[in-house]
C-alpha cells in the first residue's frame, strides 16, 4: 500500500493557494472575504487592531467575474449539439445523454458553460467519464439500475494534485484526485473525524485510497493508506478528459494582477478617506486653562486673541490615487483584449468611436473562436471515451455543431440603431423579422436552438398578423372618412371638408359625429 508521503506528491504546475485566490477573485462576496488577508496584507509596524479595522472597511468591486461570465455567455450563444455526418438522426442514447450528462439534469449546453467558466478561472478543467459497475439478470433490472448510463463528473481543479501527460496523444497517463471531508452521520453526531481520500485514475484501474483520523491528529507521512475500492478500466485509457485553455488564453491569470491592484488602491483610498475625512480643530489660546466650549447645538466661545484653525491632510495624494484607480480599471479591460491582438481600450465605452468598438468586438471574436475550437475538441474526446466504454463504433462518426456564433453588440447601441432604422422606414417584412431576430439573440443569447426556432416562427406569425391588422385599420379609416364626408355634405351651410364642425378636427372627433350605421359602401357626395 502507498504511504501518505507518496500519495500527497504534487505536480510542479500545481499551486492550490493561487487557484483558490483566482476562485475568490471570480466569485467575490464571502468567498473573497475569507481570503482577504491574501490580497490586503498587514503593513510593517501596523498594529493588529488597526489592521483588522482596515480589513473590515475594505470593499471588493468585482470586474473579473462579469468579464468571465460575459465570455462564457457569448461563447454558448449557439449551444453545442451532437450531429451525424449524414442526414440520419443520432441514436436515442445520445439524445438522452446530451439532455442529461451528469444524472442531475444538466444538459450539454450547461456543462459546456460551466466548463469554460472554470477553465477561464483556473486554467484547466478535468472531466471524469464514469460508467456504473455491476451486472443484471434481466434487461428491466439493467435499465432500472442505470447500468447503461454514462455520466460526466467535473473534478475540482484545485483538488487535482498530480497528473502525467502523454505528449504524443494528448491523453493522460494517470491522475491523482485528493479530497478532504468531515462527515456528520446524524444530527446527534459531531464532525470530529476527517476523511482523507486519494482517487488514482490509471489506464488499467481506478483506485481509491482512504484514511480516517480525529480532527487535528493526522498520522505521519510514513503511514500506509488502505485501498478501499478498485475498478478495472476495460478500454485501457484514463477516463478523464482535460480541457486546457493554455497559458496565453487563461483569462483570470492574465487579468488577476490588474484586478488585485485595483482592489488594493480602492481599499487604500477608502481607508485614507475614512481615517482623515474629519478635520481636527486646533485652538490657539493665550490662556490654556480656559478651554473653549463647543459641541452639537452649541456655540464656541473664544478669548479676544484666541484663534481656531482646522488640521486636515493634503488632498493631492487622494487625487493621484483616484486617477490611478481609473487607469487601473481601464488596464484590466485592456489586458483582456490584448489576449487577441493587443487592442487598446484608452477610453470608456460610452466615449469610444464606432471604429474603436468594432475593433474591440473583433478582438473579442478572435478570443471566442479560439475557445470554441478547444471546447469542441474536448467534447469530441468525451464522446470518443463514451463510445469506447459502450463499444459504440458509430460514436466516431458524430460531430459537434454549434459554438460558431458570437454576437457582441452593446444593447444600447442596438436599440439606437433600430430606432433610427424605424425613423427612416424600411417597408420590408424580411428586414423587420431580421431586426427582431437580432434583438432576440442579444437579449437571450443562451436559448437552445429548439426554443429559438419556436420563437422565430411565432415572430413570423406575429408580423403577418400585424400586417393584416394594419391593412384592416387603413381600410376602416378610409371608409370612415368617406362616410363622414358624405354626411357632412348633406348639411346646408357647411363645407364638405369641415369634418369636425370648425374646418378640421381629429379622427376621434370625427368618430363622435359619424352615423351610428356605417354605409354598405361609400358613395359620392350629393350637391
Image: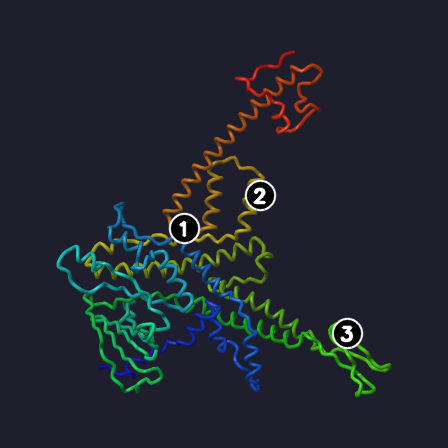
Q: x, y (%) of residue 322?
A: 62, 70
- Residue drawn at x 39%, y 43% is 454
Q: Nearer the viewer, mark 2 or mark 1?
A: 1
Residue 133 in the figure: left or right of residue 461: left
| Mark 2–mark 3 CB contact (< 8 Å) | no
In the picture provided, is 341 more to the left or to the right than 9? right
Pair 1/3: label in front: 3
Residue 180 visible in this rendered orientation of the protein: no
Q: Residues within 10 Å of mark 2 (few under 14, many from 20)?
A: few
Query: What kind of element bears circle 3?
Result: loop
Query: Could you say whether the residue bearing mark 1 is in a helix, strand or loop?
Result: loop
- Residue 8 position (above or below residue 443): below
Residue assigned mark 2: 420
Outermost residue on the right side: it is: 304
Q: Which callout, 2 or 3, points at the residue further toward the start of the chain? A: 3
Which comes sooner in the sequence, label 1 or label 3? Answer: 3
Q: Residue furthest top?
A: 527
Mark-to-mark CA distance, 2 and 1: 27 Å
Relative to 70, residue 314 above or below: below
Q: Is residue 195 above or below residue 384?
A: below
Is 36 in front, or is 326?
A: 36
Left or right? Give the position of 420 relative to 200: right
Give the distance between the C-alpha atoms of the residues marked 2 and 3, in whole angstroms: 61 Å
Q: Position of residue 40 (x, y in %)?
A: 52, 77
Q: Which residue is mark 3?
A: 298
Are there few (<14), some (14-19), or many (20+) residues within 10 Å of tag 3?
few
Q: Which mark is residue 447?
A: 1
Amino acid at each position: 500500500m502507498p504511504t501518505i508521503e507518496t500519495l500527497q506528491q504534487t505536480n510542479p504546475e500545481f499551486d492550490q493557494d493561487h487557484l483558490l485566490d483566482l476562485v475568490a477573485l471570480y466569485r467575490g462576496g464571502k468567498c473573497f472575504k475569507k481570503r482577504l488577508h491574501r490580497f490586503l496584507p498587514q503593513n510593517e509596524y501596523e498594529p493588529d487592531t488597526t489592521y483588522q479595522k482596515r480589513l473590515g472597511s475594505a470593499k471588493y468591486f468585482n470586474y473579473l467575474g462579469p468579464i468571465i461570465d460575459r465570455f462564457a455567455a457569448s461563447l454558448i450563444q449557439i449551444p453545442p449539439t451532437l450531429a451525424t455526418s449524414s442526414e440520419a438522426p443520432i441514436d436515442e442514447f445520445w439524445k438522452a445523454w446530451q439532455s442529461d450528462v451528469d444524472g442531475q439534469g444538466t444538459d450539454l449546453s450547461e456543462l459546456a458553460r460551466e466548463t469554460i467558466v472554470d477553465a477561464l478561472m483556473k486554467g484547466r478543467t478535468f472531466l471524469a467519464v464514469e460508467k456504473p459497475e455491476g451486472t443484471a439478470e434481466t434487461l428491466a433490472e439493467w435499465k432500472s439500475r442505470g447500468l447503461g448510463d454514462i455520466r460526466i463528473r467535473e473534478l475540482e481543479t484545485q483538488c487535482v494534485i498530480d497528473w502525467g501527460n502523454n505528449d504524443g496523444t494528448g491523453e493522460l497517463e494517470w491522475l491523482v484526485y485528493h479530497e478532504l471531508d468531515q462527515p456528520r452521520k446524524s444530527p446527534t453526531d459531531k464532525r470530529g473525524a476527517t476523511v482523507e481520500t486519494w482517487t488514482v485514475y490509471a489506464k488499467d484501474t481506478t483506485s481509491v485510497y482512504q484514511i480516517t483520523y480525529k480532527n487535528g491528529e493526522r498520522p505521519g507521512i510514513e503511514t500506509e493508506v488502505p485501498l478501499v475500492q478498485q475498478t478495472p478500466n476495460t478500454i485501457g485509457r484514463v477516463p478523464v478528459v482535460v480541457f486546457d485553455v493554455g497559458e496565453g488564453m487563461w483569462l483570470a491569470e492574465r487579468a488577476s494582477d490588474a484586478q488585485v491592484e485595483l482592489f488594493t488602491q480602492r481599499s487604500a483610498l477608502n481607508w485614507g478617506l475614512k481615517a482623515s475625512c474629519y478635520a481636527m480643530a486646533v485652538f490657539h489660546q493665550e490662556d490654556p486653562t480656559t478651554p473653549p466650549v463647543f459641541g452639537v447645538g452649541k456655540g464656541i466661545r473664544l478669548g479676544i486673541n484666541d484663534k481656531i484653525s482646522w488640521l486636515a491632510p493634503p488632498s493631492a495624494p487622494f487625487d493621484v490615487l483616484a486617477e490611478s484607480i481609473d487607469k487601473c480599471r481601464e488596464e484590466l479591460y485592456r489586458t483582456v483584449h490584448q489576449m487577441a491582438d493587443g487592442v487598446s481600450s484608452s477610453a470608456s465605452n460610452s466615449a469610444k468611436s464606432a471604429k474603436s468598438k468594432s475593433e474591440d468586438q473583433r478582438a473579442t471574436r478572435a478570443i471566442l473562436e479560439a475557445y470554441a475550437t478547444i471546447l469542441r475538441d474536448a467534447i469530441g474526446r468525451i464522446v470518443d471515451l463514451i463510445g469506447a466504454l459502450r463499444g459504440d463504433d458509430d460514436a466516431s462518426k458524430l460531430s459537434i455543431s454549434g459554438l460558431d456564433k458570437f454576437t457582441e453588440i452593446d444593447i444600447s447601441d442596438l436599440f439606437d440603431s433600430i430606432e433610427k432604422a424605424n425613423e427612416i422606414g424600411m417597408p420590408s417584412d424580411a428586414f423587420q423579422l431580421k431586426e427582431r431576430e437580432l434583438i432576440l439573440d442579444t437579449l437571450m443569447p443562451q436559448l437552445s436552438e429548439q426554443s429559438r426556432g419556436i420563437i422565430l416562427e411565432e415572430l413570423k406569425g406575429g408580423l403577418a398578423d400585424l400586417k393584416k391588422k394594419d391593412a384592416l385599420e387603413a381600410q376602416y379609416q378610409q371608409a370612415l372618412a368617406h362616410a363622414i364626408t358624405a354626411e357632412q355634405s348633406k348639411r346646408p351651410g357647411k363645407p364638405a371638408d369641415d369634418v369636425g364642425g370648425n374646418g378640421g378636427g381629429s379622427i376621434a372627433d370625427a368618430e363622435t359625429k359619424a352615423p351610428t350605421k356605417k354605409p354598405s359602401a361609400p358613395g359620392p357626395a350629393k350637391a
